[in-house]
Image (cartoon, rainbow, N blue to C red):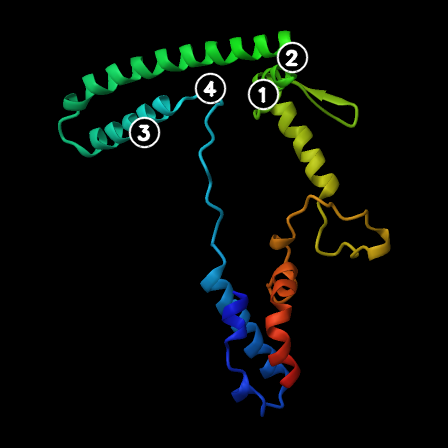
C-alpha cells in the first residue's frame, strides 16, 4: 500500500482551495487503497488437535470430498459404503494417534518434568458452552430461564441509552492493550492505525496540497 500511495500523482489537486473537497479527495484515495490492499476478512485456518497426523488430515479431506460428491449426486448409495468405511478408518487412526500422543506426554513429564501435559488437560477441561451455573451480583442461576434473566440484568447494567451523558476521557479506565486497534475507526470510518501506517507516503502530497 505504501508503494502505491508513494507513486500517486497529487499535482492536479494542488490548485484546489476548498479544504472540505481536499479532505474528501484524500479520504477517497485512502478508501480506494483499503479496497485494493486490505483483506476483507482474515483467513481462518482450520486447527486440528495436536495428535492429528498428516495421514489423518488427508483422510479427513477425502471424507469431506466424498460427502460433497454424495450431496450433489442423485445416487447417494454409490458413496455410502466408501464414506462408512473411511469414517471407521479415520476414527481408528484418531484413537491410536491420541493414545500415542498422550503416552508421549506422560513419558515426557516423567523423565523431563515437561508441563505440556497440564496444558493438554486444561484444553480437555475447558468449555466454550454456557456453564451449568451462572452467577451475577450475588444471584445464581441454573435453569435456562434464570440464566436469560441474569444475562438481561448484565446487559442493562452496561447498556447506555441515547440520552446518557458521554463520559469524559479522564473518567474512563485505561485502554485495553489487547484491543485490535485496526478495528477502531474515527468519524471518517478509517482505522487510526491505518492512517498512521499511511502517514509517511501521504505526507508529501498532503504538504503540497
Mark 2 residue element: helix
Q: Which mark identifies residue 51? A: 4
Mark 3 or 4: the one toward you: 4
Residue 13: x %, y % from top left: 55, 86
Q: Dot 2 surroundings within 10 Å: few (below 14), some, or many (20 or more)?
A: few
Q: Which mark identifies residue 112? A: 2
Q: Which mark identifies residue 123? A: 1
Residue most extreme to the front: 111
Residue 187: x %, y % from top left: 65, 65
Mark 2 or 4: the one toward you: 2
Question: Which residue corresponds to the image point at 65% horizontal and 12% vertical from the top-left?
Answer: 112
Mark 4 or 1: the one toward you: 4
Question: Which residue corresponds to the image point at 64% horizontal and 25% vertical from the top-left?
Answer: 147
Mark 3 residue element: helix
In the foreground, 80 or 33: 33
Relative vertical location of residue 92 with respect to residue 182 in this rendering, above or below: above
Question: Counting residues from the N terminus, which is met first, the one under dot 2 or under dot 4?
Answer: 4
Mark 1 residue element: helix
Residue most extreme to the right: 170
Disc 2/disc 1 C-alpha distance (Å): 21 Å
Question: Counting residues from the N terminus, which is met first, the one under dot 3 or under dot 1?
Answer: 3
Q: Is residue 188 left or right of residue 173?
A: left
Mark 3 or 2: the one toward you: 2
Relative vertical location of residue 147 with respect to residue 10 in this rendering, above or below: above
Q: Which mark identifies residue 167? A: none
Disc 3/disc 1 C-alpha distance (Å): 24 Å
Q: Are marks 2 and 4 in contact (CB under 8 Å)?
A: no
Disc 3/disc 2 C-alpha distance (Å): 36 Å
Q: Are marks 2 and 1 in contact (CB under 8 Å)?
A: no
Disc 2/disc 4 C-alpha distance (Å): 20 Å
| Quadrant assignment for the C terminus | bottom right
Question: Which residue corresponds to the image point at 56% horizontal and 24% vertical from the top-left?
Answer: 129
Amino acid at each position: 500500500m505504501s508503494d502505491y500511495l508513494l507513486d500517486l500523482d497529487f499535482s492536479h489537486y494542488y490548485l484546489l482551495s476548498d479544504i472540505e473537497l481536499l479532505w474528501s479527495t484524500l479520504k477517497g484515495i485512502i478508501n480506494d487503497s483499503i479496497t485494493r490492499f486490505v483483506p476483507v476478512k482474515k483467513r481462518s485456518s482450520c486447527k486440528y488437535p495436536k495428535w492429528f497426523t498428516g495421514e489423518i488430515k488427508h483422510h479427513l479431506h477425502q471424507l469431506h470430498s466424498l460427502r460433497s460428491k454424495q450431496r450433489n449426486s442423485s445416487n447417494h448409495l454409490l458413496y455410502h459404503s466408501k464414506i462408512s468405511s473411511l469414517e471407521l478408518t479415520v476414527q481408528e487412526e484418531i484413537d491410536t494417534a491420541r493414545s500415542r500422543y498422550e503416552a508421549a506426554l506422560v513419558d515426557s513429564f516423567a523423565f523431563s518434568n515437561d508441563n505440556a501435559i497440564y496444558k493438554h488437560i486444561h484444553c480437555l477441561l475447558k468449555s466454550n458452552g454456557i456453564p451449568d451455573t451462572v452467577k451475577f451480583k450475588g444471584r445464581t442461576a441454573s435453569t435456562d430461564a434464570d440464566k436469560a434473566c441474569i444475562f438481561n440484568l448484565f446487559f442493562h447494567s452496561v447498556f447506555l441509552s441515547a440520552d446518557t451523558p458521554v463520559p469524559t476521557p479522564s473518567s474512563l479506565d485505561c485502554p485495553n492493550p489487547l484491543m485490535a486497534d485496526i478495528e477502531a475507526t474515527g468519524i471518517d470510518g478509517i482505522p487510526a492505525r491505518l492512517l498512521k501506517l499511511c502517514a509517511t507516503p501521504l505526507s508529501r502530497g498532503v504538504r503540497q496540497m
